[in-house]
Image (cartoon, coloured by chain):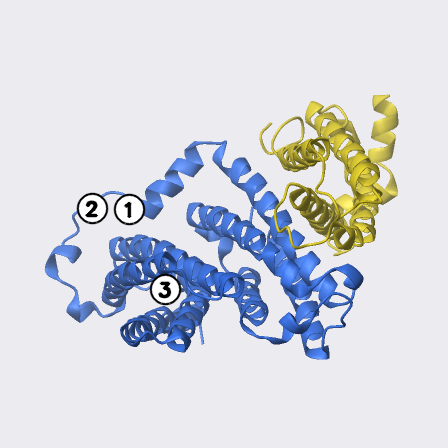
Amino acid sequence: MNPAHIHLLLNHFPTIGFGIGLGLLLIALLWNSHDLKRASLVIFFITAALAIATYVSGNDAHAAIKDIPGLSPALINAHESAALVAFAFMQATGFFAWLALWLLRRISRFPNWNLAAVLVLAIVSSALMARAASIGTEIRHVEIQSGQETSGADPGPTLARSWALYVQTHSWVWPTCETLHFIGLSMLFAVVLAVDLRMLGMGKKSLSFAALHQLLPLGMLGFGINLITGIMFFVSTPQQYVGFLFFLKMMLVVAGAFNVLYFILLNEPWTVGEGDDASKKTKLVAASAIAIWVGVLFCGHMLPFLGNSF
Amino acid sequence: MTEFLLHIEQSGFCQWVRESDSLFAYSGILLMHTIGMGFVVGISACMDLRILGFAPAIKLAGIERFSPVLWAGFWVNTITGVILVAIHATSKLVNPDFYIKMVFIALAIIALQMLKTRVFRDPLIDKIPPSPKAKMLAVLSLIFWIGAITSGRLLAYVGPGSAGS
């Protein structure tokens, strides 16, 4: 299995996930079913997380196939940019789905504006994704390429490539994003440490899970900053982010998404009041959260040393 | 002075840290410095934001229990930081940005200690909301940490021996 196969495998998740999520959400809104709404939001959140791995695997796939004759670089670039736009909308959908699940615990219902935002973003994402997928399909299936795209007329730099050019010609962008990436990291660590160290027993006398739950959006904001700045690095110098170590970092991020789902979805952590010990299972999930995010930091940090960056 | 710095920089230990491929050398020391930063700034930011009224259900007395983690991170970063400066002593110690970073860290630690006496050692903690002065200190603390991260990150880009020179 080469990286192109991995991309072809992973690229089914966003399309299928958003298809199922959108179907469920529409049925849930028609029947006004709380449980179906919740299920669709979980699917959007998880699919958005998997889309991170899907999006970055395209880069490895590109590196693996770039020397195969007959493939159109213009089509590959067009696919990259279409995927980038679809990816951005999917992440926004995933964020609002997460927010709705978080708010459910605070106000015991899904706010209508929040569900509306998820619905609109999911519809737009699905349309953008269909466009990205259809361009992507043409890359390999030469028989269905329409004549005009292979006629060789230069369509000019795509969105992603002109962005990369901007970063390469403006020396302040990279250090600024690096700094923001570190600030986002600290915000994420603030929440991961406070919630998970408490679940492991630190400061248990005066901290309940219900109180710490209020902190979670800060961690999500930190993650959001790092996703945006991270994609900025990735799009500007894709050749640095080829290979196992970076892909492992992205898979750990996906694992982190599943991990946070335990704390926003299940009732078990909610039983941890002031002075209570968390269950063994909750402690295990809490410890794994710290391990996952330190692992993410490790993989990112080691890119220049063990990987092929910089 | 330069000779002295050169002497440190050229010592066997510093050469090993710079040139070895071992995970315990440069890459690992820098990794510990970044993880330590996450611990120090993360916990400190939690305290500051809580004092400012964010996540009001969290008890300040509870957050104070995370202090040992913050200080563990601080000492890890002091040790790794000394090594990271020593291995590039002749360039980092003449870089004004390095001193800006040190000032920010010193101010952040002073703010932290002042919050400790004014908020966390207050017998009325969690009974009355933090005073406007405490909130001001919390804002300053956040600004100092952001300043420390920014100047620290920029050490890789500005001044002698950096990517930007």
Would you place residue A182 above or below residue A245 in this image?
above
Q: Nearer the viewer, residue A134 or A169?
A: A134
The residue at the point 16 percent across, 48 percent down is A153
Marks 1 and 3 close (CB-CB < 8 Å): no
Q: Earlier in the sequence, mark 2 or mark 3?
A: 3
How many numbered circles does the render carry? 3
Q: Nearer the viewer, residue A105 or A222?
A: A105
Direction from residue A118 to residue B125 in the image, left or right:
right
Direction from residue A24 to residue B75 in the image, left or right:
right
| Helix, strand or loop for disc 2 | loop
Q: Which mark is residue A155?
A: 2
Q: Is circle 1 on the same chain as circle 3?
A: yes
| Helix, strand or loop for disc 1 | loop
Would you place residue B88 above or below residue A68 in this image?
above
Q: Amino acid at mark 2?
A: Pro
Q: Quadrant of residue B112?
A: top right
Chain on which label 3 sits: A
Direction from residue A209 to residue A118 in the image, left or right:
left
Q: Which mark is residue A158?
A: 1
| Helix, strand or loop for disc 3 | helix
Q: Amino acid at mark 1?
A: Thr
Marks 1 and 2 close (CB-CB < 8 Å): yes
Q: Which residue is mark 3?
A: A65
Mark 1 is surrounded, within 10 Å at the Cα level, by few (under 14), some (14 to 19) or many (20 or more) other residues, namely some
Q: Residue furthest left?
A: A147
| Letter of the chain in blue | A
Can you give x and y, in whole percent of width and height, for residue A178 in the image?
56, 41
Chain on which label 2 sits: A
Can you give x and y, in whole percent of width and height, for residue A199 in the image?
72, 67
Chain B: drawing colour: yellow
Q: Is circle 1 on the same chain as circle 2?
A: yes
